[in-house]
Amino acid sequence: MHASELGPATWIRIRRPATWGAVLAFGALWLLTRWGVGNPPSNWQEFTYPFTLAFAYLVLSPVPWQWTGNDQPLTSMARGLTQAMLWNLVWVAGMTILLSLNFSGDRRGPGPSSGGLGRHGSRVEGAERPRYPLVHPRLVAVAIANLSLAMLIGWILADKERAERKESDANRTAAAAQARALQAQMNPHVLFNAISGLTELVREDPRATEDALVSLASLLRSLLESSSKPLGPLSAEKALIEQYLALETIRLGHRLRVVWEWDPELESQELPPLLLQPLVENAIKHGVAPHRGGGELRIFLKTEGHEIRLGVANTGEPLIQGAPEGIGLRNLRERLALLGERPEALHLEREGDWTLAELILRKRNEVQA
């Protein structure tokens, strides 16, 4: 990792409930053990020590193993050992100094003039209490043990996070590939429905069929371009829908009435292609086209808070509740799930004479976050 990535990675570890659960469990077990052997903590340093130690092990010790200076999630063994030695030495030394305060009153007794106690409790002049070294040997042993464990635990946790990151990247790649496959599946589906509509036009108006074939070629070109991109601006989605509507207008004539309620300021927002087109196609195929008088098609794009709302409302044949969904809608639901959207991101409902199909999407930066 680069140095700029270490902070966010550490913050993710801090936010994990499992981290705090392990810290609390370790600290509680430590304190219960001390009480069980008759040596309870005598001050706040001894009480907070096991919790601080567990926090350092779980949160801080992986950092030097993750600092690679490049895009790799785990450093080499030689560099990791060096960095871990220096990094962990800092907080281990700090904790050792904190613990040394517990021994400050026991390092040396009173001076010669203060005297000691005799055999029957009387003070003996000139007697001295034992003198302890400035750094207690027990603290040195504890510091060495903590340093060794921190280096080992840090490597284990960093390697575990590397494996999790690799698995997450693989899952994202697989989901993206599956979404791209579903996106590519929409191309022949759109063309199949468009060509099916033209078969009626060939018998009724051969001249109009020529214009329709030109529009069909333009639509095919746009479909090929959109299928090669994982994201595209909503302006490109609108252009593709306009080409599709031009083709349907040749077939349906005045029976198809289109109204755009489109916020142009949102056209720069990038979303996966072919999210809105299936809704437009579905509205025409099941709502407008089957009705003798045709129907009105309202295509809208707006924003509410952190959400983008886009969809289609149409008159004509009413929505049949509980009817099985076609390929286009099933494909769209699967793509939305792979993109991390909520199950309720797509909903269909009847509002009076109108059938509403609406997408409620989070903005792409919030989905990734």
Image: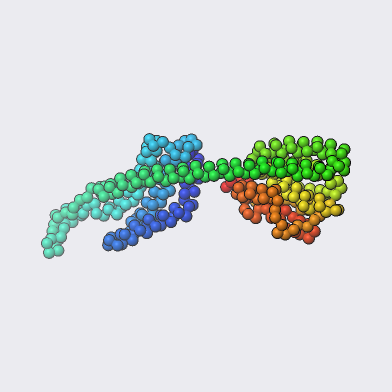
Say if 159 sits above or below 26 in the image: above
Question: At 31% across and 62% down in the image, what residue appears?
Answer: 35
Question: At 41% across and 49% down in the image, what residue appears?
Answer: 58
Q: Can residue 205 be seen by looking at this rendering?
A: yes
Q: Horizontally, is 151 left or right of 344 in the view? A: left
Front-most of residues 246 and 23: 246
Front-most of residues 217 and 164: 217
Q: Can residue 309 be seen by looking at this rendering?
A: no
Q: Position of residue 101 (x, y in %)?
A: 31, 52
Q: Position of residue 70 (x, y in %)?
A: 48, 35
Front-most of residues 173 and 132: 173
Q: Position of residue 215 (x, y in %)?
A: 80, 38
The total number of labels drawn is 0
Question: At 81% across and 42% down in the image, what residue appears?
Answer: 198
Q: Position of residue 283 (x, y in %)?
A: 76, 51
Q: Horizontally, is 320 left or right of 25 in the view? A: right
